[in-house]
Amino acid sequence: MRRLVPIVLAATVLLAGCQDGGGGDSTASNAAFDPATCQGGTLTVLNQGGITHLDPARLYTSGGGNVPSLLFRTLTTRNRQPGEAGTKPAPDLATDLGTPSDGAKTWTYHLRDGVAFEDGTPITSADVKYGIERSFAPELPGGAPYLRDWLKDAAGYQGPYKQPDGIKSIETPDAKTIVFKLSKPEGDFPFLATATQFAPVPKAKDTGTEYEKHPISSGPYRVESYEPKKSLVLVRNTHWSTKIDELRYACPDRIEVTSGLDSAVINQRLVTGAGPDAAAVTTDAVVGPEQLAQLGTGSELDKRVTRGEFPSTTYLAFNTKKAPFDNPKVREALSYAINRTSVVNALGGSAVVGASTTFLPPQKALGHQAYDYFPAGEGGNPEKAKQVLAEAGLSNLTIELAHQNDDSEGVGPKVASAIQEAFKQAGVTVKLTAIDSATYRDVTGKPATQPGLALATWGADWPSGGPFLIPIFDGRQIITAGGNFNLAQYNDSEVNAEIDAINALTDPAEAAARWGALDAKLGKLALVLPLTHEKDVYLYGKNVKNAYADGWRGQLDLARISVK
């Protein structure tokens, strides 16, 4: 799903990512770090995005700056490592990543011993099932939609409040076993099982829409206080220990999250480090221009920076059902004409984005394969673009480009103007159409109102090529009523069949190779025009230790950070 800025837990925030494992002297500071002796102190989290909902059913993922995973354990979780190792799932409540059978249409999990809620009540498979069933309730919207599609005969289920008999395709033969029956093979199920919908919820403590005021913790912390969109205070859950959860270190005694702050204010507070800000981090305010200018100069800030990459692509979406973009030659010509350097500069420079000629970002876990079928070079190739248009019998072409009316998500006026100027060099006149950011997704995501050309972004919900390519290129995903992400409106039976075949694979490496090959195949059709991929740079306070961007989504992992 698309990554929104600022990040809001209830929004369609995208999972996944990998990075270089940190910056500055993080290696040295991590070498002195010992998870066995890291306990103590208060960690301050300064964020832009507000925590709108704290119900695991309403959270899109276990992301949101990794805050939810401090409260909620799921069947599997991120491996919580920097670099490539962090792109893999790891067992959490479950003893392993699950056992597939029936060609990956059935997945069986067993809960580990000793897992309990914050009140000491043992967690059972029925609690996990009930937590999942709650996420189907229309009263609790906002969660990831995959299970409604993946689980057998579950599409019409309306949650336990209306249908207390539950989902038949989730079986709990005993207190420690849970079995999922799927409608089709899904080799990525261990990745999906990291989503907060898989967090256990005790039925006896469920208060429906009021549950989020004090959700029952299964993780290392419990809620002391919560004010939606403003603040969250977490304290230790005494019924959790590293003996039953080796992945979360839970070093601070207390975590205080403040939301709704301006990005510039956050970064300035991290730079200054006064009082509690010396032990502060952010999970959604990337370093601004002022701080970027100081990095790499030997300044003190170089010791307090970590770099990550959330797998996200900014691109131009062609509506192939509308002229002139139904003509492949037009799409190819514009691909030659694009000046990616100017787009990179419009988005803040090469420290925060990189130029992309592929739809899959350059990350191994996604299956990335390098290709550049319409070489534009660093500054565009307008002469080649003119030649291709001439071959198509076109000249003096005028097109419209839709974009958001602000630059908050990187698809606004700055990037649109850079594209307009690049295409002008190729003799193409671009008329810019600004659409209010609040309605942009509605307009572009409905085929009846979708423009011929629009700026878009996409990111993966987990580090695999599937959630990156399927919504964009699977013809069966086209939604005419609205909420459509296949903006090319591309539907090819062979591509759809290849998607099904890859989905049935349970070996991530084998699947990655196939996803990369499919991306390369689709790239020849110029259905989209890739522009950039995301890079993230985060500062942290001078009293923070073991701060690194995890390999899953490129953000600081709060579960492993400690404070002096």
Image: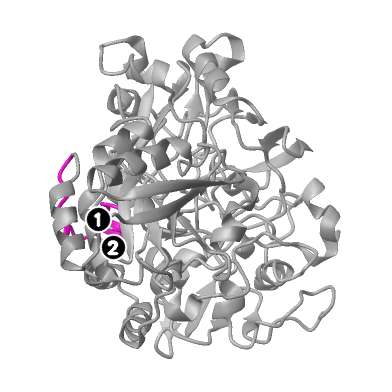
- Mark 2 = which residue? 331
Which residue is located at x 30 percent, y 50 percent?
A: 428
**How crowded is the residue under tag 2: few (<14 C-alpha within 10 Å), some, or many (20+)?**
many
| Amino acid marked by disc 2 | Arg
Residue 534 appears in which quarter of the rendering?
top left
Mark 1 residue crowding within 10 angstroms, few (<14) / some (14–19) / many (20+) = many
**Which residue does the image show at 54% across and 40% down from the upper left?**
5
- Front one among 190 and 121: 190
Report whether residue 96 is seen.
no
Residue 46, position as x, y percentages in the image: 59, 27
Q: CA distance from mark 2 to mark 1?
A: 6 Å
Residue 329 in the image: state x and y as whole percent.
23, 67
Label 1: which secondary element: helix
Please name the residue that numbered disc 1 is placed on. 335
| Quadrant in the picture for residue 448 | bottom right
Instruction: Indicate the secondary structure of the residue bearing disc 2.
Output: helix
Q: Is residue 375 magenta?
A: yes
Type of secondary structure dominating the magenta stretch: loop
Assess whether mark 1 and mark 2 are in contact (beta carbons under 8 angstroms). Answer: yes
Position of 5 relative to 15 (above/below): above
Q: What span is colored magenta in the figure?
A: 359-378
Please indicate, yes or no, whether residue 164 appears anywhere in the rendered image. Answer: yes
Quick check: 223 left or right of 512? right
Residue visible at 38% across and 78% down?
503
**As shown in the figure, which amino acid type bears the numbered disc 1?**
Ser
Position in image of residue 55 (x %, y %)? 72, 54
Side (left or right) of 180 relative to 345: right
Front one among 282 and 475: 475
Residues 156 and 279: in front is: 156
